[in-house]
């Protein structure tokens, strides 16, 4: 269980760093004004991947705790 908690913290740290990046800021801001670029698609996909990883780890921890 501790391994999962460590992995979750790493995933959260990675997501936080990703969200603090210029790439994330531009990708999220560009869609607001109709600007679409393949780089932004990749950044958004990475965001979804990291969020999904965090959700999965949280679910696995919750499952083991119950």
Image: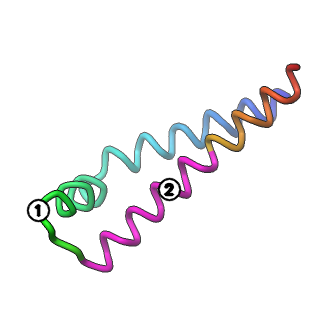
Which element is circle 2 on? helix
In reply to whether residue 47 is colored magenta, the answer given is yes
- Which of 65 and 20 lies nearest the eye of the viewer? 65
Total marks shown come to 2
Quarter in which the N terminus is drawn: top right
Looking at the image, residue 30 lies above or below residue 11 = below
In reply to whether residue 40 is colored magenta, the answer given is yes
Q: Mark 1 points at which residue?
A: 33
Q: Position of residue 29 (x, y in %)?
A: 18, 55
Mark 1 burial class by Cα count in 10 Å: few <14, some 14-19, many 20+: few
- Which of 6 and 45 lies nearest the eye of the viewer? 45
Closer to the chain start, of discs 2 and 1, is: 1
Looking at the image, residue 39 lies above or below residue 60 = below
Q: Mark 2 points at which residue?
A: 48
User: Which of the 4 image quadrants contains residue 31?
Assistant: bottom left
Q: Where is residue 33 in the image (x, y as percent from the top left)?
A: 11, 62
Tell me whether circle 2 and circle 1 mark residues in contact (CB < 8 Å): no
User: Which of the 4 image quadrants contains residue 38?
Assistant: bottom left
Looking at the image, residue 23 lies above or below residue 7 = below
- Which of 57 and 5 lies nearest the eye of the viewer? 57
Please report the bounds of the magenta region as a residue range: 37-53
Question: Residue at the location (30% across, 69% down)?
Answer: 40
Q: Is residue 11 shown left or right of residue 18?
A: right
Measured in 3D between alpha carbons, the distance from the residue under mark 2 to the one under mark 1, in whole angstroms, is 21 Å
Q: Is residue 38 shown left or right of residue 56?
A: left
Quarter in which the C terminus is drawn: top right
Q: Is the magenta stretch mostly helix, strand or loop?
A: helix
């Amino acid at each position: 269980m501790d391994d999962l908690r460590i992995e979750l913290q790493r995933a959260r740290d990675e997501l936080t760093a990703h969200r603090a990046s210029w790439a994330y800021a531009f990708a999220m801001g560009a869609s607001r004004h109709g600007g679409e670029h393949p780089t932004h698609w990749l950044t958004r996909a990475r965001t979804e991947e990291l969020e999904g990883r965090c959700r999965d780890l949280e679910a696995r921890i919750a499952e083991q705790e119950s």
